[in-house]
Image: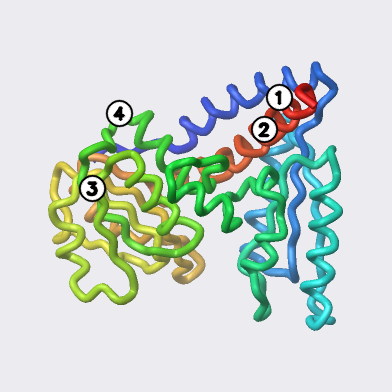
Amino acid sequence: MQLIDGRQVAETVRTDLRERIAVLRSQDIQPRLAILVVGEDIRTERYIAAKQQAADEIGIAVELIRFTIDEPETLTDRIEARIKSLNDDLQTHGIILQLPIPIPIDEQELLDSIKPTKDVDGLTLTNQAALEAGRELFLPATPQGILRLLTVSNIPIADTRIAMIGQGRLVGRSLTAMLRSRDADVVTADSHTRDLAAVVRGAAIVISAVGKENLITEDMVDEQMVLIDVGLSDVDGKLQGDIAPAAKEKARLATPVIGGVGPMTVISLLANVVLAAELAALRASNA
């Protein structure tokens, strides 16, 4: 088994982004990302810190906007008001709402209040519909990173049977649509799938984004498979992937739990911010 090094691929993307940001800065444009955070959660704070550090390293400004949950009845109005302000702010190029929100609330309603041209997570219904129709603007970060890993590793997608395990909003559903628009033969599994092994067997590429330890076992895979491990679970304080270590050892190529898909997710989000800034500059020049 050979590991797919997400850190190395992310560094290549990072170099490209630095060059593009230098061009923007020469036009007095500072790419800026606004991150809206509701409440406090240790894992969420970890993700935010990673985004902030990566953005700072390449020259993207980050504005962190926090909302308390002590007055839940006003939370939607407070968030929507701030999003409206950011939509109108020409200096802000990307807006993300950190999910999940820790109290019951209509997350999609809030996401849809983000202007599609600033929706760098690609989660508004407008951008999701464009993605499913093959007219993508901003690709969701994790699916985008996975596609880049496959491309850089010279793994064909068109006419390839791919098993997509998990159909969540952030990864599975979006990535399924993206793969099909690239002529992949995609089979899917979710929580209602009775025979997971039958879905996995026969696939050339298996992508699992569930968050269940050792969901994909050695007996399900063969020596020619490519395994992309997206889902994470915390087991006794240690991060574990969906795909069992023995399954990865058996496969041809696999991503590690640490240093695989994760670095690609962060850098792909920042790539969307840079693209949003470039598109805003283009619109301004044509106005």
189 relative to 70 in the view: left or right: left
Q: Nearer the viewer, mark 4 or mark 3?
A: 3
Residue highlighted by disc 4: 154
Which is nearer the N-term, disc 4 or disc 3?
4
Q: Position of residue 83 (x, y in %)?
A: 79, 57
Q: CA distance from mark 2 to mark 3?
A: 32 Å
Residue at the image position 58 percent from the left and 44 percent from the top: 266
Residue highlighted by disc 2: 274
Q: CA distance from mark 1 to mark 3?
A: 37 Å
Q: Are marks 1 and 3 in contact (CB under 8 Å)?
A: no
Residue highlighted by disc 3: 185
Task: Please rate how many residues cluster around mark 3, counting C-alpha atoms within 10 Å: few if below 14, some from 14 to 19, many from 20.
Answer: some
Q: Position of residue 229 (x, y in %)?
A: 37, 52
Task: Please rate how many residues cluster around mark 1, counting C-alpha atoms within 10 Å: few if below 14, some from 14 to 19, many from 20.
Answer: many
Residue highlighted by disc 1: 21
245 relative to 166 in the view: left or right: left
Q: Which corner quadrant of the image does residue 252 belong to?
A: top left
Q: CA distance from mark 4 to mark 3?
A: 18 Å
Q: Which corner quadrant of the image does residue 71 belong to?
A: bottom right
